[in-house]
């Protein structure tokens, strides 16, 4: 009759070590997979939110009148938070909300102002870009300037269109291609008019002054925007885009 030999102490220790090693490897694989999924999900959400924000800005700029656009900060309001304001002929009233309003000749009926502002707290590296609307009190065919600064009134109709936007005048270490990101007065939301002084073949010049105040030949009806986003304090990216006012 054949005898069955039991495991020696050394064999038992080896098997236990292999079992523990297998468990550690499995746990590590699960953690890496989970981290990758979370990073991919976060990147998708950030990119999706950014694209939606750009769509909002481009649509509002495309439908507005150049003469009504104000960008901040500017020489007259140097302490105002980064932002922009403009007229819109989309209905403000709830019963026609978002409907394009035109008269019988097809001219836009300006009904409200659309305002964007970077809302942030002192000492914080990032804030939220907020879009809000305000009905025009005395409506006519003229594209009037907004009476309110973009940072005033966001509690009423404001909605966040982009999160994690860099605040003005902050320095973030160990991020970006150069190892450091430093923002100016525009922070992570810069809006400027594009002008070509001397004609269409001239060099482009960026300014915060509405071009309708200068030589009309220098106007391009275009604006340049730049967004700077810092996610979780370590993932930084920036992108620029342009929009053109139709009227």
Image (tube, rainbow, N blue to C red):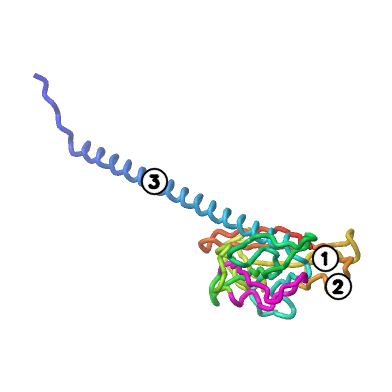
Q: CA distance from mark 3 to mark 1?
A: 54 Å
Give the quadrant of the C terminus.
Answer: bottom right
Q: Residue at x 14, y 28 (%)?
A: 5
Mark 2 Cα-neighbour bin, 10 Å: few <14, some 14–19, many ≥20: few
Q: Secondary structure at mark 3?
A: helix
Q: Residue at x 17, y 34 (%)?
A: 7
Mark 3 Cα-neighbour bin, 10 Å: few <14, some 14–19, many ≥20: few
**Side of 153 relative to 147 (left or right):** left
Q: CA distance from mark 2 to mark 3?
A: 62 Å
Residue 195 disc label: 1
Residue 28 percent across, percent down from the top left:
38, 47
Q: Secondary structure at mark 2?
A: loop
Whichever of callouts 2 and 3 sits on the residue coming sooner in the sequence is 3
Magenta segment: 127-153
Residue 214 disc label: 2
The one of 98 and 65 positioned closer to us in this rendering: 98
The one of 65 and 40 positioned closer to us in this rendering: 65
Q: Give the main secondary structure of the magenta stretch.
A: loop
Residue 132 percent across, percent down from the top left:
61, 69
Q: Residue at x 73, y 76 (%)?
A: 74
Give the quadrant of the N terminus.
Answer: top left
The one of 213 and 127 positioned closer to us in this rendering: 213
Residue 128 disc label: none
Circle 3 residue: 30
Residue 205 percent across, percent down from the top left:
81, 66
Select label 2 or label 1 by which is in front.
2
- Residue 163 falls within the magenta-colored stretch: no
- Residue 152 falls within the magenta-colored stretch: yes
Check if mark 2's residue and mark 1's residue have beta carbons within 8 Å: yes
């Amino acid at each position: 009759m054949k005898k069955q030999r039991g495991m020696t102490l050394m064999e038992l220790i080896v098997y236990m070590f292999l079992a523990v090693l297998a468990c550690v490897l499995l746990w590590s694989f699960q953690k890496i997979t989970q981290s990758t999924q979370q990073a991919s999900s976060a990147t998708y959400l950030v990119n999706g939110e950014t694209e939606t924000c750009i769509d909002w800005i481009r649509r509002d700029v495309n439908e507005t009148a150049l003469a009504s656009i104000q960008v901040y900060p500017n020489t007259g309001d140097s302490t105002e938070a980064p932002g922009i304001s403009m007229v819109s002929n989309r209905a403000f009233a709830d019963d026609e909300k978002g409907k394009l309003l035109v008269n019988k000749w097809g001219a836009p009926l300006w009904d409200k102002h659309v305002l964007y502002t970077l809302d942030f707290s002192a000492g914080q590296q990032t804030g939220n870009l907020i879009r809000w609307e305000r009905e025009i009190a005395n409506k006519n065919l003229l594209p009037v300037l907004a009476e309110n600064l973009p940072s005033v009134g966001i509690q009423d109709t404001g909605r966040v269109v982009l999160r994690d936007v860099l605040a003005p005048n902050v320095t973030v270490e160990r991020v970006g291609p150069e190892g450091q990101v430093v923002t100016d007065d525009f922070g992570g939301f810069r809006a400027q008019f594009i002008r070509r002084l001397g004609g269409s073949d001239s060099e482009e010049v960026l300014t915060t002054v509405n071009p309708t105040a200068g030589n009309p030949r220098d106007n391009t009806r275009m604006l340049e925007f730049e967004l700077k986003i810092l996610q979780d304090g370590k993932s930084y990216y920036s992108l620029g885009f342009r929009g053109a006012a139709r009227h």
